[in-house]
Amino acid sequence: MALRSRTKRVTINVKPAPNVGLTLFVAADSLPSDWARLVLAEKEVDSAAIQTIRPGEVDEDFLLLNPTQALPTLADREGVIQSARVIVEYLDERYPHPSMMPLSPSGRARVRMTLHRIDNELFPLAAKMRGTGAEASAARTALVQGLLDGARFFPSRGYFFGSEYTLADAAWAVLFRRLLASSVTIPRDASSMIAYAERLFARPAFLRCFNSTPKSVSRKA
């Protein structure tokens, strides 16, 4: 593209986005990134691409789209979107079938309150427990206790807010997957939570997204 000034001709090289369609840039082993990936899998967007950015890796296309290099990031024809919470709601509105939010304002508010807790409290605890030492141990204890305190809210049938799978269910799915990968044990008296997690793991989108069939959630007597 060429621009004219009063004194000379100025040429600016504009580099196009790496893909014409939708691209989700994610971090490996990241709960927010896994959440966005799972929602995208539920939407079955044929033209979507997923690109993993490794630590210390410089990707020129990604740097052009998002100089802050925050992950996950979604690049679409409509623009560049950051933050997992914003991305998953955008995907649900951009691809409304199947809908992953309730129709009623009160139902959507309940989902958003749950998302706020998962994203701001539980995801950070799950990230901290992957470390070592006292901080990791404290995070593991706090996370498990927080789940057990709310175990009565996990449904014995269906999904978290009834018969329809929502953005909250996708968030719970990646959190439970992290617990499984970290060999966290769940008491047997939390049977409804365990059964709920296993229903989430059995969804076709989950199996496609993570290319595996998880074992049963760890339990202890």
Image: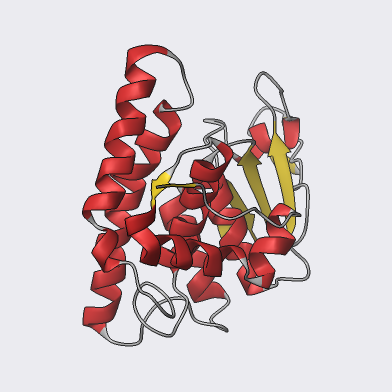
**Colour mapping used in the image:** secondary structure
Q: Residue at the front extreme?
A: 221
Left or right position of 167 against 154:
right
Spot occupied by residue 50 in the image (x, y as percentages of width and height): 72, 51
Q: Is residue 69 left or right of residue 63?
A: left
Up/down of 148 relative to 195, above or below: above
Residue 129 quadrant: top left
Task: Say which of 19 and 26 sits in front.
Answer: 26
From what the image shows, is residue 179 above or below residue 193?
above
The single residue placed furthest to the top in the displayed view is 133
At which x and y percent is residue 190? 34, 58
Rendered residue at 63%/73% (across/down): 43
Nearest the eye: 6 or 36: 36
Quadrant that contains the N terminus:
top right
Name the residue: 52% across, 35% down.
Answer: 70
The one nearer the camera, 18 or 101, is 101
Relative to 215, say whether 202 is above or below: below
Relative to the observer, which residue lies in front, 1 or 97? 97
- 103 left or right of 17 in image: left
The quarter of the displayed image where residue 46 is located: bottom right
Residue at the location (33% across, 29% down)?
139
Q: How many numbered discs, if any?
A: 0
Residue in view at x 35 percent, y 73 percent: 155
Please say if 55 is above or below 208. Answer: above
Looking at the rendering, which quadrant does residue 121 occupy? top left
Q: Is residue 116 visible?
A: yes
Q: x%, y% of residue 57? A: 71, 22
Is any part of residue 22 visible from this angle?
Answer: no
Report x, y in % for residue 72.
55, 44
